Amino acid sequence: MDAHKNFAYSTVATPPSPAASGTSLGVAAGDGVAFPAPPFNVTIWPASAIPVRSNAEVARCTGLATDTMTITRAQEGSSARAIVAGDQIAATVTDKMVSDLDDALIYKGDWAAGSYNDGDIVVYNGQLYICTQDGITAAPAGWPVLNPVSYIQQSIIDAAGDLLVGSADNVIAKLPVGTLGQVLTRVSTAPFVGWQTPAIAPAAPGTQLDYAQITAQPAAVTASTEATAVAIITGNLVTYDGTRVKIEFYAPGLDATANANLNIVLLRDSTVIGYGQAAVSATGFYYTIDAFTFDTPPAGAHTYSVSAFRGGGGNPIIHAGPGGSGNVLPAYLRVTKA
């Protein structure tokens, strides 16, 4: 990029010879110091006028000795004109100057093998480097560092939730996102932070751990064997701490033909943890079911459920409703801390 100076202006004291093709001119005595160090472009136009395309020429000053300029004529698409004494000359803003500014610093992204020019900026080993010569093919390790502070590349992040942490002095590393429910905590090895599943504090006895209900009467139980038992109610997937719990199944009503039995199966996941039986001794009578058992589930996530099958007689019907005025109460499965 060319050098610049404010108010780099003068008039032509000694015109070039020949006037339209000569390559040397003199500016007014003492005005040579007003111009920057060559090379730079100047605009030359008539006295008492403003420079326009039809009357001005852009020349390139390639040498300046006191008040004498060596110039290359008809630059930047302009036409050579007959320069005369008294013409105005100035280092003005030209297309080249603006283009040079546009091209002065060009961000090229991550360095890749190839040719780079003066002003190209690249990222290399996490730092910004600037090329100061044209046609450079060597790796940027020997280029000036544009900013000694490390530049964090976007490519280090692979997923939403990834974190950047310090793994050593002035070293940044990625900590991949943890899984659902994990928390960030200090660990014993570098980078000394990590994701861990928090320990579950023991619940107080009687604390409800899970609750599920049905608010509409299920279909009559027609299954006659445990292998074909039908699901009545299924709880939620809950993480337990490995201590003892109480599982309770309640239904506000049961009816069937006389001498019909309803066999109840309580399960943890697919493991049977207990049975119950409700018997109907006379047709038209309604019986409440309230069955419970205790269990010590392994620490981790489990689901409790209730299935049922009939044990003779007709097909038992478990009653359940939404509750409220005029409605049957819900049936429910509840797990509490024992």
Image: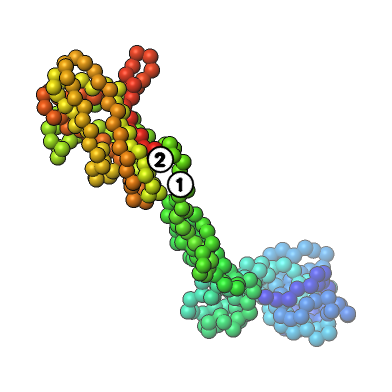
From the viewer's perspective, tell me whether residue 256 is left or right of residue 195: left
Which residue is pictured at 25% across the width and 20% down the height?
287
Residue at the spot of label 1:
202
Could you say which is closer to the camera, residue 109 or residue 5? 109
Q: How crowded is mark 1: few (under 14 residues within 10 Å), some or many (20 or more)?
A: few
**Is residue 108 visible to the viewer in this orientation of the structure?**
no
From the viewer's perspective, tell me whether residue 239 is left or right of residue 2: left
Could you say which is closer to the camera, residue 149 or residue 317? 317
**Is residue 252 visible to the viewer in this orientation of the structure?**
yes
Give the Cα separation between the discs numbered 1 and 2.
9 Å
Tell me where residue 102 sits by quadrant.
Answer: bottom right
- Mark sitting earlier along the chain (1/2): 1
From the viewer's perspective, tell me whether residue 38 is left or right of residue 86: left
Q: Quadrant of the C terminus?
A: top left
* Residue 212: percent from left, percent from top: 35, 33
Q: Is residue 178 above or below residue 36?
A: above
Which residue is pictured at 75% across the width and 65% down the height?
51
Tell whether label 2 touches label 1 (CB within 8 Å).
yes
Q: In this view, does 271 lie above or below 78?
A: above
* Residue 205: percent from left, percent from top: 44, 39
At mark 2, the secondary structure is strand
Residue 296 is tagged as: none
From the viewer's perspective, tell me whether residue 239 is left or right of residue 227: right
Residue 337 is tagged as: 2
Q: Is residue 65 above or below residue 12?
A: below
